[in-house]
Image (cartoon, rainbow, N blue to C red):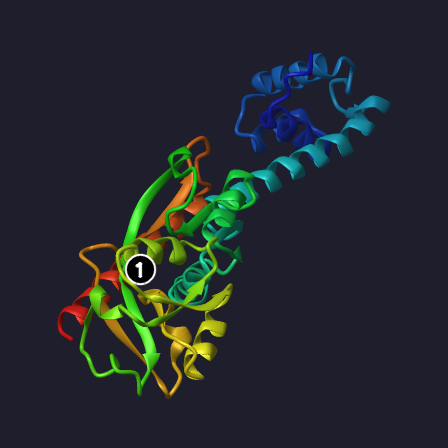
Amino acid sequence: MPPNISTKLLHAFLALNECKHFTRAAERCNLSQSAFSVLIQKLEAAVGAQLVERDTRNVTFTAEGEMFVEVARSLVTDIESAFSDMADYVARRKGRVSIAALPSLAANGLPAVIAQYKKQFPGVTVQLFDALSDQCLGLLRLGKVDLALTAPGTSLTEFETRTLCSDPFYLVCRRDHPLAKKKSIALADLGGCDLIHLAKSTSVRQHVDLLIRNIAVNNAGFEVEHLATVAGLIEHGLGVSLVPELTLFQFRLMNLTAIPVETNDIVRPIYIVKRKDRNLSIAAQGLFDLIETQLRSDGRERKTIRENL
């Protein structure tokens, strides 16, 4: 059974080592001499050896006592350091947060939130993984990240999810396309369009397939992984594409335009996700709260802009 040694006993012993006098050491510890002597006796009992030689005038340490001075100093330093570190983590002066996010969010929206968080808590390290929905959830499942920002994916029910915002769809086309002058388009307007697809593994593709399931679009023959590739193909007249609003920053080319699509409320929800079986650290909870506040606010601002188009 490990000895039951409190910091009070250690501090008393170190005070005696410095003062070499029971009365003065007791005064330093704000104790009576008898109460102080009891502490030293308890320490000796816990250690299992006599630490102090006592006589009426002098206090000397036994060999074991001299050895235990360094032990006591080391223990006190370690305990004080541990509590100091813990206080830093509680106050978010130290810590680490890992987050996985869809590439569209990792590049647009989330960086501003992370910058604000780092300004408030510069001692906290933030690690970011940009990945597709299923990969985000995989990282969360393995415990490699604390949070995930993702669209619907497989096995979401095993996690705790909250909806941050909804991501409506836009048609991106060249400015000389027949639909480019419209303020908004109905899904039926897409009939006959050459559609450039994102890969089937993406959440965007899964939603687009739902949108066009009853529309006679032409497959342009391209199924690509990256939005930059989609933009390049559209710019060179090889088709059009349906993409969510959060990705539109990828299409800021002079010859392209984005038109809102009337989708009968079929939109891509964006979730903030965490594990059900693990509480967030104080640092991670702080980032979670800031993401909820900022990205929900950004979603309301985008909705207001859309309604005033």
Q: Residue furthest right?
A: 63
Question: In x, y percent, where is residue 273?
Answer: 39, 44
Q: Position of residue 155 (x, y in %)?
A: 43, 37
Which quadrant of the figure contains the C terminus? Answer: bottom left
Give residue 192's quadrant in the image. Answer: bottom left
| Image location of residue 40, percent across then percent down | 67, 19
* Residue 278 horizontal/vertical position (percent): 46, 33
Residue at (46% x, 50% y) in the render? 92
Residue shown at the point (78%, 15%) measured from the top left: 50
Quarter of the image containing the N terminus? Answer: top right
Q: Is 216 or 9 nearer to us in this picture?
A: 216
Q: Is residue 124 in sight in this rendering?
A: no
Residue 214 falls left or right of residue 146: left
Q: Which quadrant holds residue 244?
A: bottom left
Disc 1 marks which amino acid? Gln
Front position in the image: 275 or 2: 275
